[in-house]
Image (spheres, helix red, strand yellow):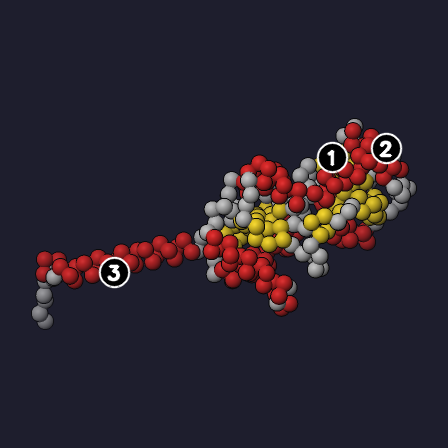
Amino acid sequence: MRIVKVSFSNLRSSHFKFICMFVCLLAVSASQSVWAQEPLTLGVHPFLSYIEIEKNFGPLATYLSQELSRPVVVRVGSSYQEHIDTIGHDQLDIAYIGPAVYVALVEKYGPKPLIVCQETNGSPVFRGVIVVRGDYPATSLAELGEGELAFVDAHSTMGFLIPKLMLQQSAPHLIANQRYQFVGSHENVALGVLAGDFIAGAVKEAVYQKFKPRGLRTLVATPPIAEHLFVASNRLAEATVKQLRVAMLKLNQDKNLH
C-alpha cells in the first residue's frame, strides 16, 4: 500500500478557494436552518384560564406552524397590562387582542401591522353580558342592591369598560364608590357570581353560555362591539406577515380547517 502525504501546499489555489467557499456556504446554510426553526410566539391576554387558552389557541398554533414551516408557540400574558407592554416592545411575534386593548396599545406604542380581525359564527362583532345568579331578585341594573361587582381587568372590553359605561348610567353609585373587584378572567367572574361572592359580574357572551346551565342569568347585554384581532410585531418580516394573513384567511375559506 502506498501512502501519499497531502498538504495545502500541494493543492492548487483554485481548489483551495473552492473548498473555502463550500465550507462558508455550509456554515451559512446551517445558520439559516437554525434561524428558520426559531419559534414564532403567539401571545394571548389572560381572558380565560391558562388551560382554556391552550385548548383554544393550541390548534391555531399547530396550523400556523404547518403553513409557515416554522414552529409557533402560545404564550399567555400574566395580565392585560403585561400583554400590552410585551406587544408594545415587540417581544411577541403575533398577538391576539381585544378592541379596547388595541386602542390602549396604539395610544402608548403606536400602530402594529394588522393580520386579521376575528369573526365568530360569521360575525365581526360580539357582545358582553352582565350576569347574576338565577335566584337573585334584580331584573335591571338599577335594582342591584348591596354588594360588590366582579370584573375581569381594567383593560377588558366586555369584562369592564363597556359594562362600566352602562352601570354609570343606570347604577352610578356602584361605580362611583368602586364597589367592584378585578378577578383576572371571565371564568373567575362567572364562578364568583355563582358562589355568591359578588352580586353581579361582566363576562363575554360565550362564557355566559358556558356557565348558564350552572345557574347564571342575564341581567342585561351590552351593545355589539368589534371583535378581537391579530396583530404582528413591527420587527417581523413583511413577507412573514403576508404569510400569516394568507394562512388566517384560508381558515375561513376551507371548512375542513375549522
Distance of label 3 from label 1 (alpha carbons): 64 Å
Relative to 180, say whether 256 is above or below.
Answer: below
Give the residue drawn at x 78%, y 32%.
175
Q: Which amino acid does label 2 sit on?
A: Glu
Look at the image and tell me in which quarter the N terminus lies: bottom left
Give the residue drawn at x 63%, y 53%.
117
Relative to 110, say whether 207 is above or below.
Answer: below
* Position in image of residue 137 (x %, y %): 91, 42
Q: Is mark 2 on a helix, strand or loop?
A: loop
Residue annotated with mark 1:
181
Q: Which of marks 2 and 1 is nearer the N terminus?
A: 2
| Residues under numbered marks 3 and 1 in contact, where contact means CB atoms less than 8 Å apart | no
Give the residue drawn at x 67%, y 56%.
119
Q: Which amino acid does label 3 sit on?
A: Phe
Residue annotated with mark 2:
146
Q: Nearer the viewer, mark 2 or mark 3?
A: 3
Query: Residue 107 versus residue 84: which sits nearer the camera?
Result: 107
Residue 16 shows in the view: yes
**Count of residue discs:** 3
Residue annotated with mark 3:
22
* Position in image of residue 177 (x %, y %): 79, 28
Query: Residue 222 versus residue 2: which sits nearer the camera?
Result: 222
Q: Is mark 1 on a helix, strand or loop?
A: strand
Mark 2 crowd level (few <14, some 14–19, many ≥20, 10 Å Cα): few
Relative to 177, say whether 247 is above or below.
Answer: below
Q: Is mark 3 on a helix, strand or loop?
A: helix
Mark 1 crowd level (few <14, some 14–19, many ≥20, 10 Å Cα): some
Distance of label 2 from label 1 (alpha carbons): 14 Å
Q: Earlier in the sequence, mark 2 or mark 3?
A: 3
Query: Residue 219 versus residue 169: which sits nearer the camera?
Result: 169
Q: What residue type is labelled 1?
A: Gln
Q: Quadrant of residue 164?
A: top right
